[in-house]
Image (cartoon, rainbow, N blue to C red):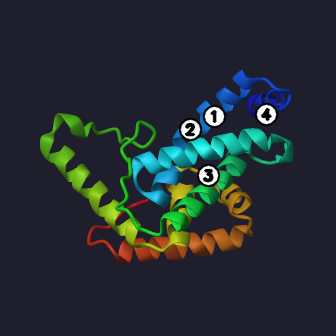
Amino acid sequence: MDAERDLVARSRAGDRRAFAALIERHQVAALRVATAIVGSGGQAEDVVQEAFIKSFTRLDQFDADRSFKAWLLAIVTNEARNRRRGDGRRDALTLRLATPEHATSTDTTTDPARAQEASELRHRLAVALAALGDRDREVVALRYFADLSEAEMAESMGCPVGTVKSRLSRALDRLRASTSTEVLL
């Protein structure tokens, strides 16, 4: 049994520390997905908090043979989708793409011009992502902000891997077409 399965089993048995460890493992990915869907950081944090509560109360519904991360991010995605629908507005997205996990080997903070260029690229990407439809934003968020594999995405989205591949391809085509700078994801 791997460490995550052990944490899930202990969480189901009522070990809150084990559940906290599970949440800590997936907190960044959950926040990225929520932010990509609802936009503002405050709303994204609320979505993630609600999703964590729901996941804890529904641990008995989790299939231990599946990916916990994919299951949790499906809950985050649904919560974010519901929040977005309920609000009925499209906020400008604030994405945090320059995270330690995605940083390049070149430190842009030592070169102000490179730091400005990176900031402008993130802004253009955020605007282009905000212009995408909900489905496209979700598939991009699950792949590149949550770093799910295509199989995990299929599990999280409740569709076949082939559907994930085609949705992702079309979303990336739309994203590239909507920005003047080629965005490599």
Can you identify the residue that label 1 sits on? 23
Q: CA distance from mark 2 to mark 3?
A: 10 Å
Q: In this view of the protein, can residue 5 be seen by the observer? A: yes
Q: CA distance from mark 1 to mark 2?
A: 6 Å
Q: Callout 2: helix, strand or loop? A: helix
Q: Position of residue 127 (x, y in %)?
A: 32, 65
Query: Which sits earlier in the primary sequence, circle 2 or circle 4?
Result: 4
Q: CA distance from mark 3 to mark 4?
A: 18 Å
Q: Callout 4: helix, strand or loop? A: helix
Residue at 22% across, 56% down: 120
Instruction: Tell me the amino acid under the disc marked 4.
Output: Val
Can you identify the residue that label 4 sits on? 8
Query: Which sits earlier in the primary sequence, circle 4 or circle 1?
Result: 4
- Quadrant assignment for the N terminus: top right
Is the C-beta separation of discs 4 and 1 under 8 Å? no
How would you rate the neighbour count of disc 1 (Cα within 10 Å): few for under 14, some for 14-19, many for 20 or more? some
Q: Which mark is residue 27?
A: 2
Q: Position of residue 174 (x, y in %)?
A: 43, 76
Q: Callout 3: helix, strand or loop? A: helix
Instruction: Tell me the amino acid under the disc marked 2.
Output: Gln
Instruction: Tell me the amino acid under the disc marked 1.
Output: Ile
Can you identify the residue that label 3 sits on? 76
Q: Position of residue 180 (x, y in %)?
A: 26, 72
Query: Which sits earlier in the primary sequence, circle 3 or circle 4?
Result: 4
Is the C-beta separation of discs 2 and 4 under 8 Å? no
Q: CA distance from mark 1 to mark 3?
A: 12 Å
